[in-house]
Amino acid sequence: MLILAEFVFRIGLVIMILSRRRIEPTTRLSWIILLLAIPVIGSIIYLLVGETRFGRQRIARHRRIIEALARPEVHANADPGTSAAGSLKSASLRIARLAELVSDSGPVLGNEIELFGDTNLILDGLEKDINAAREHCHLEFFIWLDDAAGVRIGEALIRAVARGLQSRVLVDGVGSKAFLRSALCRKMRAGGVEVVAALPANAVRALFSRIDLRNHRKIVVIDRGLAWTGSQNLAEASFAPKPKFAPWVDCAVRLQGPAAKELHLLFVEDWYLDTDESLIELLMTPVAMRPHGVPAQAFGTGPNFQNLAATQGLQSFIHEAKSQLVITTPYFVPDNATVVNLATAARRGVDVHLVVPRRNDSFLVGLASRSCYGTLLESGVHIHEFEGGLLHAKTITLDSDISLVSSANLDRRSLFLNFEAGLYVYDQDFTSQLRFLQQSYMDSSRQVDPVSWNKRGAKARLAENAAGLLSPLL
């Protein structure tokens, strides 16, 4: 009787999956296979992480903050003379329009942007900016470690509070779980730094909301007009939790100008979600344009609002490419649209390069990633496997004109589940700098040879294709 009841329950879940809206057919099919193939356990897994349940209280809180932010004066492009829409080329303008539709942040002029491809230099710059802060320091990270980097920045924030500044830190409740229980966190709180866990997860919360919806953003905003974003977590390159894959190779941008206001808006939104404290007044002051600044556009995506924004932005990049497209990502488990569009771009003559780590810290993700290689290689996509550590930089350059530096990986989690953030830069000089950094990654990589790839053993193909079946769930 219990076996029959369990089977009926699984069939009910299958019907539920078939009736869901806004879900990829491949994802739908993967869940159904899992439910039918693994009794009981498959149902438990689906109930825990199958539905994008954000929780009623968070949904209501998010609605309140979105409504409060739905006024022109809080956005940078509403300030006189800052909108870049009238000065962008056609391809840039199309990408900017889509990004604004899904993220509400328009392209703005007057941004001074520096590119950093070294963790030590990023930490040096961040500490220097905190030491020079005069009003506030707002930091948001997926991972904050209790290592030399974490201590260094934590103590800088304590010193900032001692000078009379407001220091707020928002870290993901799962990614920074160890830090939130550490002596460093207690020391920071005792020193006046407000440390808050974003999206805290526990067994009780799992009954009401999906616990693997994570805040993966990396944002720092200092004194309203200075910001950092990119792939860098608050951790040393040696990355203590997984030292055998080190060094972690990251990329970040430091920007001064109106686009910093849009990144600040994302922090304000996230802070409200987990504290109920409104910081909207901090967004009411215009941020001055830098004299020799360039057009840029901040964006944010997440599962609670416009959760197709990340993949739509990625597809627009691929479609707009005319001569060259270079992508770097640590985790490449794309949706079907990305594979098809990358292959199509290569076949129509675009020089497409994909750079990923040769050794991935997630064995299953590495296998699933390689399951896509065959289609891409046959189409002429150049795949480079980085050998200098774990390449963690998430970047795209398009035709030497447009750049993207973000926190988002090219996997289903970043595209559909995580809260992510990043920056589009519409400038040839900056894009050339980022392209030079990407080339350094390729110079430290081994390019996958299509002929050798097709000759690999049946055992490898079997493992990769089996992992590929699960890719919609990874």
Image (cartoon, rainbow, N blue to C red):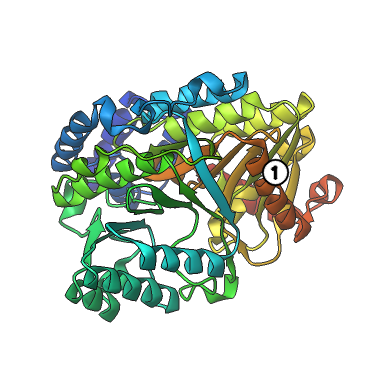
Q: Which of 214 and 276 lies nearest the eye of the viewer?
A: 276
> Is residue 382 rendered to the left or right of residue 472?
right
For residue 172, side relative to residue 366 (left or right) = left
Q: Is residue 454 above or below residue 239?
A: above
Extreme residue toward the front, this view: 291
Please state the horizontal and vertical placement of residue 443, each as a whole percent of the image: 78, 57
* Residue 461 visible within the image: no
User: Which amino acid lies under the numbered mark 1 shown in the image of this protein?
Assistant: Ser
Residue at the farthest right position: 451
Residue at image point 49% right, 28% down: 312
Q: Secondary structure at mark 1?
A: helix
Where residue 473 sits, quadrant-wise, is top left
Q: Does residue 414 sit above or below 67 in this rendering?
A: below
- Residue 369 location in percent, x, y? 61, 48
The answer to whether residue 183 of the structure is visible from this angle is yes
Mark 1 — residue?
432
Image quarter hosting the N terminus? top left
